[in-house]
Amino acid sequence: MGKDPEIQANKKIKIDELTPFEVPLGAFECEACKAVTFRLVRTAEDVSENIEGFHPEFCHQIFGEEEIVYGYKGLKVNVYLHCVSMQALVDIQFAEKMPPPLRAGMGGGRAPDDIEGLLKEALPSGFTTHRKDFLAILDRLQACPPQLPSQATLLAQGAEGETEWSVASLSLEKSSEMKNLAERLQPLVLFFIDGGSFIDTEDPKWDLHVLLVKDAQGQTSLAGFCTVYRFYGYPESIRLRISQVIVLPPYQRHGHCSRLIESVYSQARMPAGGVLDVTMEEPTDVLRRVRDRVELRGLLANPLFSQAAAAAVTAGATETPPKRAMQVPEQVSHNARSDLKMCKGQLARCWEFLLYREINKQKLGREESGALERMIKQRLTASRRSEENRAKGKCIKKTEEGFVMMKISKMAVGKSETGAEEKEDVYETTAHRLSKEEDSGDAKGEDGEEMTGPTVEDEFKQVMEHLQYLSGWLAA
């Protein structure tokens, strides 16, 4: 359906006077991410479009892949959220809604989107569309401000200028208030994490970490949160997996994301926690950078790690081949996991930076930097082959002789402390080992076909750029 030039030229003609096939395409379409505005409020006086708001980053899980709201002109969807409890008012306004006579000629008779119905699916914890009811909620919360449950654990606190901040956590199973708050926070995942999904708040293994800020007037607001899952770690440990991390736009660029991640490591290091390490579920590039900075601060705070990196680089300068001398020492791996709760994969990334830093500090030559580059490429190749072969029932393991392809031969079943069955992969070594071709980044699939997607060389360039970024961050 094209646009009629004569109709476009005649600005006095009203849409409702046109035939169905004369309506310009897109006249009743709005960009969802621009139409939706979140506004954090505390009092009845705040419930106004004069209060500064922020737009979502994603709307495709609510309004479809193209993120278009159909059937409206001049659409505004204001979502007012109480700044602590996250209870919501949805106020939908529009200049014009597509008249019924035009629907048959546009979109094959498609009716305007049911905005309220779509938002009810996205906000299952509920909201009100009645301003009077929401104002009553605000008055009640103003008279009795919400507080964290007494069982919550304070993990960190500090100040930035006149603003105080704190991070606390609590298992959802221990508090109905915390569970209800987690349910009201979950819709933000759809709007601010690409492809994000809700957690199961009925699962007792979920923890919620909340970051609160208090301004100079003593007013408290919720600035961000993260969810953490406690799952089994062989043989008798717990592994913490960071699932969702969100800092609300008004509070971004103040270091709060780092504080949320650091709070998880603080939880992991508690003496009675029995935590093996901390992992992260599919982090974005930005979140991975923040995590690297958090863990590097922990490594650099202990001179033993820097000394070990310096010794490895020195050994690499005198031993042949230098690459093997620059691998993560067993003692470093043990200390990083036991003291800092770093998982092995993340330690490998941070260890590469420590080596990179020492090579630059000692102003060593091409042989040492080349050894580091080959080690990085080997890690990237092994990671890629693991992903490619996991679905084929294979996995890559690191041994004293290098990386070895292993075949999953059976599943051994053990018991956790809760009595639930837990499975640990048992691998049978095959004769296949990573070849020099793979080590150089020219990896092929099982049948010799070239792997698709970004090459190891592309990933290697990104790693080197990231190492340079970390160097700049540390220097600053």
Image (spheres, rainbow, N blue to C red):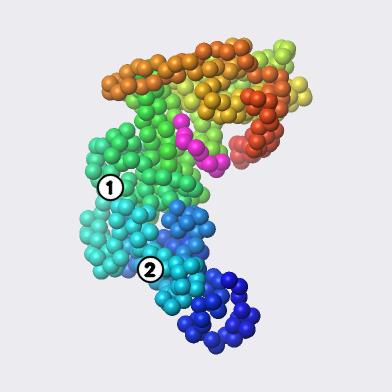
Q: Which quadrant of the rendered structure holds the C terminus?
A: top right
Location of residue 127 in the rendering, given as x and y in whole percent from the top left corner? 30, 59
Disc nearest the viewer among 2 and 1: 2
Location of residue 9 in the rendering, given as x and y in whole percent from the top left corner? 62, 84
Residue in the picture at 42% in, 65% down:
113
Q: Which of 247 and 254 is in front in this view?
A: 247
Location of residue 234 in the rendering, given as x and y in whole percent from the top left corner? 40, 19
- The image quarter containing residue 385 is top right
Residue in the picture at 43% in, 36% down:
242
Classed neighbour count for the residue bearing mark 1: other residues with Cα under 10 Å, few (<14), some (14–19), many (≥20): some
> Of helix, strand and loop, which one carries label 1?
helix
| Residue, far right | 366
- Residue of label 2: 92
Q: Give the range drawn in magenta.
A: 279-287
- The image quarter containing residue 443 is top right
Residue 26 position (above or below residue 429): below
- Residue of label 1: 180
Location of residue 273 in the rendering, given as x and y in whole percent from the top left corner? 34, 25
> Of helix, strand and loop, which one carries label 2?
strand
